Image (spheres, rainbow, N blue to C red):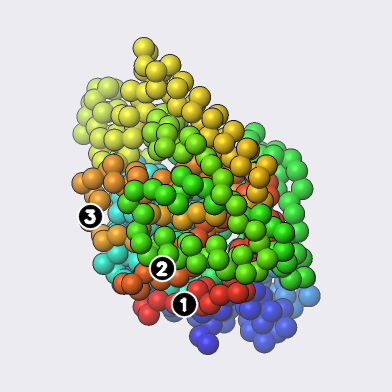
């Protein structure tokens, strides 16, 4: 096996035993990036020199016998997470030359373990999109089929992990932006509970929905990376002060699903437009869990049909407010051809933001405007409460929920660019978890007839990530879907 194909857990074992050095592993990953990146376009920036310096520091720590779980592990970071001294662009012209003076909390926690950061990953601009075609700089391609999207908005993160251009990555999930690209690229992606992982240093899209999470090649790797970044942070007012479960110990001890109740939401499994291959793979996954001792029960989430409409009022509204700061005055891009203040504002935002970001700002500004706030944002917030109550009722009947991640496998590049509604509807199975603040995970569960990955989504009650990870690991151990790799 080539070094870039190692899982985090396998690399960790080799690093701590002295069989492998962090510099050696990092050089292998950087070589893989050099070989594959021109065909995938997953990275906005590659920080090779910095990565090798970090790897040397990791080797010194390992030599002292002080290694942490991620010491020497090469990771990628979605380019909306602030990294001191390294550009953080959000894949937008308006932040093209922005270099943060500080690290996000999750980056601080990775550096505290001497993890190695190899670069910043491509995304839909300001995380607004489901295809990674809305980056201002490049279109990321799916390693399984370069004519297909990798999903979004964390498409660069998922594609890089799938193609072996890092051993794991951080993404962000506002309406499915970790889980959906994980599904399309055949990797594992976890959206933690809202408040579980600090958002300090995450460039905000929709502040009540955003959450940072890991993308990896296995459930165990996902647990390692999750435990490294999770936990209370006083710098984030939405961070929840409660212990992070030791899910790794539970995985190591072996997983027993006997008696675990798996809920099958009627509204997720009987929906128009659900691809037959996705439906078959999801049904087969439920049967596998049943064979492992779980009990499948039907549940209802009756307000699911209103989730997309509610989400696409709330998220753009919060985006309109968050993105108001990009005006060409304080930092970022400025249109210097204009002389008047208002003209400069208009020119800066018209040339700095792409079409999809502008569309969502307009939607959000309208929803928040005088005379329409109660009719749109207010009503959407009420629907959000109903959706949260649906999940609370469902988790009285079951321990985890099982559903598809996306209605179809990865679509072709370009087919939804001029049809934003189709792109929005692709999030139908994922965005409810963000509205409710619950955790969700995508794990590989099969391939379509065209050889494209299909992901299985599991969801649990707030702060029950350990339950998700143990259930996902049991499924992973019983199947071989996670072992499939794209031929890049």
Residue 415 is marked as 3
Looking at the image, residue 342 sits to the left or right of residue 18; the answer is left
Looking at the image, residue 486 sits to the left or right of residue 359; the answer is right
Whether the residues at callouts 2 and 1 have beta carbons within 8 Å, the answer is: yes
Residue 201 is marked as none
Within 10 Å of the Cα at label 3, are there few (<14), some (14-19), or many (20+) other Cα atoms?
A: few
Whether the residues at callouts 2 and 3 have beta carbons within 8 Å, the answer is: no
Of the two numbered discs 2 and 3 on the same chain, state the one appearing first in sequence: 3
Residue designated by label 2: 453
Residue designated by label 1: 484
Tell me: residue 417, above or below residue 159. above
Mark in the foreground, 2 or 3: 2
Looking at the image, residue 273 sits to the left or right of residue 293; the answer is left
Within 10 Å of the Cα at label 2, are there few (<14), some (14-19), or many (20+) other Cα atoms?
A: many
What is the spatial separation of the Cα atoms under label 2 and label 3, in whole angstroms?
19 Å
Displayed quadrant of residue 286: bottom right
From where the camera sits, is residue 91 visible?
no
In front here: 47 or 29?
29
User: Which residue is pictured at 24% across the width and 25% down the height?
Assistant: 343
Tell me: residue 392, above or below residue 244. above
Tell me: residue 147, above or below residue 363. below
- The outermost residue toward the top is 371
Q: Position of residue 67 (x, y in %)?
A: 73, 71
Q: Position of residue 415 (x, y in %)?
A: 22, 55
Within 10 Å of the Cα at label 1, are there few (<14), some (14-19), or many (20+) other Cα atoms?
A: some
């Amino acid at each position: 096996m080539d070094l870039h194909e190692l899982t985090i857990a396998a690399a960790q074992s080799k690093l701590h035993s002295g069989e492998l050095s962090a510099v050696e592993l990092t050089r292998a990953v950087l070589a893989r990036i050099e070989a594959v990146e021109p065909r995938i376009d997953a990275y906005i920036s590659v920080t090779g020199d910095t990565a090798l310096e970090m790897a040397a520091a990791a080797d010194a720590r390992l030599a002292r016998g002080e290694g942490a779980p991620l010491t020497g592990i090469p990771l990628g970071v979605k380019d909306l997470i602030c990294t001191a001294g390294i550009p953080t662009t959000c894949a937008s012209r308006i932040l093209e030359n922005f270099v943060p003076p500080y690290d996000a909390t999750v980056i601080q926690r990775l550096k505290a373990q001497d993890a190695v950061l190899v670069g910043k990953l491509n995304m839909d601009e300001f995380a607004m999109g489901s295809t990674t075609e809305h980056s201002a700089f490049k279109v990321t391609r799916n390693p399984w089929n370069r004519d297909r999207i990798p999903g979004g908005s964390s498409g660069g993160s998922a594609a890089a992990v799938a193609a072996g251009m890092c051993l794991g990555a951080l993404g962000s999930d506002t309406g499915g932006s970790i889980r959906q690209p994980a599904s399309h690229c055949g990797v594992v992606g976890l959206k933690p509970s809202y408040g579980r992982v600090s958002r300090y240093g995450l460039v905000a899209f929709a502040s009540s929905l955003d959450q940072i999470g890991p993308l990896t090649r296995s459930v165990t790797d996902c647990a390692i990376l999750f435990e490294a970044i999770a936990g209370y942070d006083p710098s984030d007012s939405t961070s929840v002060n409660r212990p992070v479960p030791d899910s790794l110990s539970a995985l190591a001890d072996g997983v027993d699903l006997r008696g675990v109740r798996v809920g099958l939401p009627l509204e997720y499994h009987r929906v128009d437009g659900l691809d037959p291959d996705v439906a078959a793979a999801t049904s087969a996954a439920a049967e596998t869990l049943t064979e492992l001792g779980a009990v499948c029960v039907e549940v209802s989430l009756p307000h699911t049909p209103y989730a997309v409409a509610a989400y696409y009022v709330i998220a753009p509204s919060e985006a309109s407010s968050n993105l108001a700061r990009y005006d060409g005055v304080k930092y970022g891009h400025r249109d210097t051809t204009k002389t008047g203040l208002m003209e400069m504002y208009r020119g800066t935002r018209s040339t700095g933001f792409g079409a999809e970001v502008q569309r969502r700002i307009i939607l959000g500004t309208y929803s928040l405007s005088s005379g329409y706030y109660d009719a749109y944002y207010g009503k959407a917030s009420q629907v959000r409460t109903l959706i949260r109550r649906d999940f609370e009722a469902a988790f009285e009947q079951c321990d985890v929920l099982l559903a598809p991640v996306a209605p179809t496998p990865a679509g072709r590049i370009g087919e939804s660019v001029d049809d934003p509604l189709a792109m929005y509807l692709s999030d139908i199975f994922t965005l409810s978890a963000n509205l409710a603040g619950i955790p969700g995970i995508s794990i590989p569960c099969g391939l379509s007839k065209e050889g494209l990955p299909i992901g299985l989504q599991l969801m649990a009650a707030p702060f029950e990530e350990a339950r998700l990870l143990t259930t996902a690991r049991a499924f992973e151990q019983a199947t071989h879907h996670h072992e499939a790799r794209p031929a890049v």
